[in-house]
Image: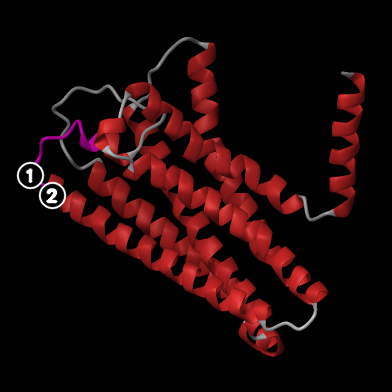
Amino acid sequence: MFFFLLNLALSDLGSICTTVPKAMHNSLWDTRNISYTGCAAQLFFFLFFFVAEFSLLTIMCYDRYVSICKPLHYGTLLGSRACAHMAAASWASAFLNALMHTANTFSLPLCQGNALDKFFCEIPQILKLSCSKSYFRKVGLIAVSACLAFGCFVFIVFSYVQIFRAMLRIPSEQGRHKAFSTCLPHLTVVSLFISTAFFAYLKPPSMSSPSLDLALSVLYSMVPPALNPLIYSLRNQELKAAVWSLMTGWFLKH
């Protein structure tokens, strides 16, 4: 789990560094410009870290499933070599996915202007600027990626169904609490990641507005990566004690 947490932290850091520095630069210098090459690079790295994070969360779900449902086989199924191979497969698939989407997106001619409504470059906004016939090819590629993402989602749901069934069979309340506490951070991170992306991309068209779209973009691109380290760190007793003392000290002063 700690090996996968390291990879997850790297993907979170990369995701934040892809969008936040440029947004801060534009805010400080009162500009909204980005070069064509910069937009392509931003789209590639955002997709790369976004897909890698979802893949890593899926692998971490499998890690929780094996540790709770098949604890005696944990060392066999999730040895150091198997973990390294799964992490490498996650990063490699994210790289190929980002490369295909970026190449296909920026191969389309832009004939609807060059102004994006978001604070960073992403595929739906760029597709709005295109009027090429290959637009349908791009939609097909997005549909394939959506199917793969849905497959990961189904795997996570199925795994947690099996995990909760195994928890209910644990005879002691302390054992059930310990098993649940090991899954709670991952379940929280997955729920935050999926729910923010769901509202950003699958909201009804009637709810669409420039201000709401901007808020949702910030929500799903910045909030999960920023909160993930905090969510996992709260299992650390020393950190929880420090946060509690900080909060109680603030309330006593006010």
For residue 32, above or below residue 41: above
- Measuring 49% from the left and 68% from the top, which residue is drawn there? 156
**As drawn, is 201 to the left or to the right of 176?**
left
- Measuring 50% from the left and 11% from the top, which residue is drawn there? 29
The residue at which mark 1 appears reads as: 133
**As drawn, is 145 to the left or to the right of 73?**
left
Q: Quadrant of residue 177?
A: bottom right
Q: Does the magenta run of residues contain 236?
A: no
The amino acid marked with disc number 2 is Phe
The amino acid marked with disc number 1 is Lys
Q: Residue 14 appears at what percent x and percent y?
A: 56, 44
Query: Which part of the image, by quadrant, shows the C terminus?
Result: top right
> How many numbered marks appear?
2
**As drawn, is 211 to the left or to the right of 114?**
right
Q: Residues within 10 Å of mark 1 (few under 14, many from 20)?
A: few
- The numbered disc on residue 5 is none
Q: CA distance from mark 2 to mark 1?
A: 7 Å
Secondary structure mostly seen in magenta is loop
The residue at which mark 2 appears reads as: 136
